[in-house]
Structure formats: C-alpha cells, structure tokens
Image: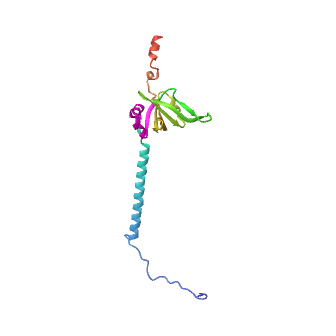
Amino acid sequence: MALVGKTLKYQPSQEPFEERPENSSSSLGSKYRLFIVLFVLVVAFVYFGFTALNEATAYYLTVDEVTEMGELASEERFQIKGSLVSESFERLPDNSGNPTTLSIFTLSGESSQLIASYDGALPELFFNPHSEIVLGGYFGTQGIFVADRVLVKCPSKYQSIDYELPADYAETVNEG
C-alpha cells in the first residue's frame, strides 16, 4: 500500500454544493432557539424583578400602629417610623466589656413606645431630637424589634423656632 512513486491528481467533485433555501429547517431551528432563549431571559428578568421588589417593599407603619397590632405584628417584616426617646440609647458590651455595634434604644410615636435593636454603625442624625427614624426589620422572640436597616430623615431646615424650643419656654420668659 505504499504510494511511493505514484502521482495523485486532485479531481474536484462533479457535484456542485447544495445551497439551502432561506426557509430551510436548520434556519427555522436557529430562529426557534433564539426565540426560546430570549423568552427564557425575559421570564428570568421579570421573575427576579418581582422578587427584588417584594423583598424591598415592606409595610410602613408608625410606632402607634404597630403597638395596636399586637401579636399580628410579629408575623411580618415591615418598617416602623418614630423618633428616638432621649437617653434611651445604649451600646451593649461584649463578654469582655468592650463596646460593640449592637445597640438597644426606644422609639416613640404619638402615644406609645417601642424597644428596638440594631447592630451596625448609626448616622449622627440618628441622635437629633427632630429626626424621624425609619427602621426596617422584624420582631424578635423577646418582643424587641430587630432592625437590619436604618433610615434617618433629616429634620426640616424650615422648622419654626417655636418648634425647636421647649414647651414651657414661653412661660419661663414671661415669668422672668
């Protein structure tokens, strides 16, 4: 079977290439696959969009509304709006007595108060008596609201001076 000394000649095929028409089955198959891939991508984006929206959306309640709900409030994740009760903020120490980022504080509404905890750094405006605080989280096993998100609304720079003064300020000025 040695081909030594023999010359091979290339002979092109006498049959021309078979051109496929535009509407061939493989062309339809690739269009169908493209449609399926695009459809799956759209469904995935819609699913993840709704999932993210549901996780980011939480009920927005005041401290008074939450205390009126009672036991029903412990079943859901929501946001609570209130203001920090002065001198209620406390950083909890670790086992060796060093301060941690875990804090416990009280939020107040119009007529009720709520104990909450947060583990993390808090903005400076958190301690401003005119700031509105919005906590996102859930109720823990001991009835303490466990916040995993803190939003502090800045006090209005257009507040009247009367609002910033103590309630008995006018009486003390008139007496003196």
Nearer the observer, 70 or 24: 70
Q: Residue 140's x, y, as percent? A: 47, 38
Which residues make up the magenta segment?
60-82
Q: Residue at x 41, y 58 (%)?
A: 40
Q: Is residue 99 magenta?
A: no
Q: Is residue 149 visible?
A: no
Outermost residue to the right = 96
* Number of numbered discs on residues: 0
Q: Residue 70's x, y, as percent? A: 40, 34
Nearer the observer, 169 or 74: 74
* Quarter-of-image position of residue 24: bottom left
Q: Residue 27's x, y, as percent? A: 40, 68
User: Is residue 167 placed above or below 35 in the rendered structure?
Assistant: above
Nearer the observer, 56 or 154: 56
* Quarter-of-image position of residue 31: bottom left
User: Is residue 170 placed above or below 65 in the rendered structure?
Assistant: above
